[in-house]
Image: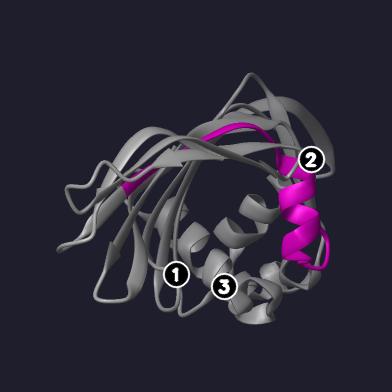
Amino acid sequence: MTFEFPGDDTLHLARGEFPWFGGTIGAYDATASFKGAANIPLRTENIDLKQVLEFASVDGLSGEGMLSGSLPLIFEGGKARIENGVLRSEGSGAIRYTGPAAEAAAAAGENAQIAFDFLRDLRYKSLEVTIDGALDGQLQFGLRFEGSGDLTVRNQNVRNVPVLYRINLTVENMDLIRQANLLKAIQLEVEEELSGTNRN
């Protein structure tokens, strides 16, 4: 970390970089004021999706791919929040989910079952995650991934079916990522997306 105090009630961070999920997260040539809100634009590069999902430790959820993006961090009133954070995939990858929510999807309706059938091995060509909210409170995630997967219809296997997912999640704090409540939220949002007017 390289920084200086210019003497005008600001901190100039020339470079602050740390390892993060196999890649790096850092701030470069950033200036933060000690008066009012401080904005530290964090940049992430080469984040390993597999390591992120292993940390989340959601039963049955795995994947692979690389992500990069920005996480603008705002400090104000002794609290920190992310505003308009976004991570995007670097090339293609995969999302796989075979956990308890998939097993219960059939009872929730055909759309939910189809959604989770795809997620058994969805090969995405693009993935984007938006992040907003307080680090010690409610966080909002928007996920959009597009790719292809296999589906069984009337005992016939249909391969490489194109699919687009849009999932919005709100969690009260980061600890909920490890809890089944998150899986329920994912299921409800996928059902809503597939049954809505923007079905893809």
Q: Is residue 163 visible?
A: no
Q: Position of residue 87 (x, y in %)?
A: 49, 38
Q: Position of residue 75 (x, y in %)?
A: 31, 63
Could you say which disc has been placed on residue 16 in the image? none
Q: Is 85 in front, or is 159?
A: 85
Q: Position of residue 39 (x, y in %)?
A: 28, 50
Say above or below: 91 vs 143. Answer: above
Q: Measure how far apart labels 2 and 3 are at the Cα level.
A: 26 Å
Closer to the chain start, of discs 1 and 2, is 2
Could you say which disc has been placed on residue 121 in the image? 2
Residue 109 occupies quadrant: bottom right
User: Circle 1: is it few (<14), some (14-19), or many (20+) Cα within 10 Å?
Assistant: some
Say above or below: 41 vs 194. Answer: above
Q: Is 86 in front, or is 113?
A: 86
Say above or below: 58 vs 7. Answer: below
Tell me the element at label 2. Answer: loop
Q: Measure how far apart labels 3 and 1 are at the Cα level.
A: 8 Å
Amino acid type assigned to the residue bearing label 2 in the image: Asp
Q: Is residue 47 visible?
A: yes
Q: Do residues under tags 2 and 3 come within 8 Å of each other at their CB atoms?
A: no
Residue 38 occupies quadrant: bottom left
Amino acid type assigned to the residue bearing label 1 in the image: Leu
Question: Going 66% across and 59% down the picture, which residue do you hit?
Answer: 113
State the residue position of label 3: 174
